[in-house]
Structure formats: structure tokens, C-alpha cells
Image: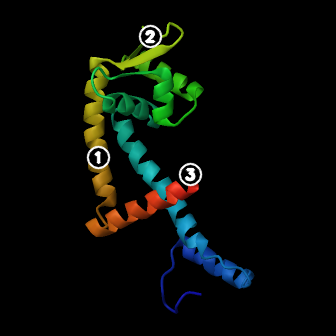
């Protein structure tokens, strides 16, 4: 139960309700999972807003960023692109199709495997992702800016450990 006069956040109010409704259950995991879920949803809104400033959706940003961080010549086999973006090959195909339509990437038959496809950044795509990524990083710095450096490092460490334990 909350201390008298203490302001509870949304999750805290829900936990307090459950504590009254089911005092036999420990609802403390909601304090972590519920808040993490709400923060993740809000972060996604904040991130997508910046992508939109560059005419990008979340999927297109992911494709362009993955190709950019692959290094010159900024190209990957479609299967590798799917693996690094952690989405299905069908989802990658749709994302790449949108990027091809915009002139940000090209798709060609692989020299190594004529059944495979290689996706590569165009000059326009490289310029776009460089500008978008700079804005994205400024946005991420703003979003974590309310946390001190030590808190950010500790949170990153804890999330990494938890993610590994969950196989994420």
C-alpha cells in the first residue's frame, strides 16, 4: 500500500488496487514490468516522431541503419538483413520494397548465390540515414538525459542481464 499523501503513478495505482482486491498475491513484478511496458511504448512514440521528420517509418529506419552500420559498401544479403533487423524475411521484403520505391536502396541478384538478393544503400539513402541517425542519437540522449550517467549505466547493465536470462 502507498504511504499517505504519496503520489502514485498509473502502475502504482493499479498495484494498489490489486493489493486490495487480492492481498494474497505478490503483485510487485508489475512495478517493473508494467512500468517497463509503459516506458517502452512512450519511447517508441518519441523515436518514431524523429524518424517521421525524415520521411521514415520505424521499418525503413531499421533497414537503412542496418545497412549503414554494416560499413562500406553498405550492402547485405537479404537473409543477413533479416537476421540483423530481427524480423521475418517477409517483413524485410516489405520494408526493402518501400526503400527501393523511395530510391534509398537498390536490390540486385547476389554474385555469390544467384538465388539470393543483395540490398545496398544508394547515395540518397546514405545521406538520409546519416542525417536521420544524428537526429535519432540526439533524441536518445534527450530521452535518457533525466537519468544520471551512473543510473543509465546500471539500467543498461540490468536490462542486458535480464534480456540474456530471457533469451531476448
Q: Residue at x 55, y 87 (%)?
A: 2
| Residue 26 disc label | none
Residue located beneath label 3 in the image: 167
Q: Position of residue 68 (x, y in %)?
A: 32, 29
How far is the residue under mark 2 from the one under mark 3?
A: 33 Å
Q: Position of residue 43 (x, y in %)?
A: 43, 53
Pick whichever of labels 1 and 3 is earlier in the sequence. Answer: 1
Pick whichever of labels 2 and 3 is earlier in the sequence. Answer: 2
In the figure, is residue 21 to the left or right of 82?
right
How far is the residue under mark 1 from the one under mark 3?
A: 26 Å
Q: Residues within 10 Å of mark 3 (few under 14, many from 20)?
A: few
Residue located beneath label 1 in the image: 137
Q: Residues within 10 Å of mark 1 (few under 14, many from 20)?
A: few
Residue 148 seen in this snapshot: no
Q: Residue at x 42, y 30 (%)?
A: 63
Secondary structure, mark 1, is: helix
Secondary structure, mark 2, is: loop
Q: Indicate the quadrant containing the N terminus: top left, top right, bottom left or bottom right.
A: bottom right
Q: Is residue 56 above or below residue 157?
A: above
Extreme residue in the front direction: 112
Pick whichever of labels 2 and 1 is earlier in the sequence. Answer: 2
Q: Is residue 164 above or below residue 86?
A: below
Residue located beneath label 2 in the image: 112
The answer to which of 116 and 7 lies nearer the viewer is: 116
Amino acid at each position: 500500500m502507498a504511504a499517505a499523501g504519496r503520489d502514485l503513478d498509473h502502475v502504482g495505482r493499479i498495484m494498489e488496487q490489486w493489493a486490495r482486491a487480492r492481498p494474497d498475491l505478490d503483485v510487485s513484478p508489475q512495478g517493473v514490468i508494467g512500468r517497463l511496458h509503459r516506458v517502452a511504448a512512450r519511447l517508441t512514440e518519441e523515436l518514431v516522431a524523429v524518424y517521421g521528420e525524415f520521411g521514415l517509418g520505424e521499418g525503413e529506419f531499421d533497414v537503412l541503419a542496418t545497412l549503414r552500420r554494416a560499413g562500406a559498401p553498405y550492402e547485405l544479403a537479404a537473409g543477413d538483413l533479416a537476421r540483423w533487423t530481427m524480423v521475418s524475411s517477409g517483413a524485410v521484403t516489405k520494408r526493402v520494397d518501400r526503400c527501393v520505391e523511395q530510391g534509398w536502396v537498390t536490390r540486385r541478384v547476389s554474385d555469390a548465390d544467384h538465388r539470393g538478393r543483395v540490398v545496398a544503400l544508394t547515395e540518397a539513402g546514405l545521406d538520409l540515414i546519416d542525417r536521420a541517425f544524428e537526429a535519432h542519437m540526439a533524441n536518445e540522449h534527450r530521452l535518457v538525459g533525466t537519468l544520471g550517467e551512473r543510473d543509465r549505466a546500471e539500467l543498461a547493465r540490468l536490462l542486458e542481464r535480464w534480456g540474456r536470462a530471457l533469451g531476448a
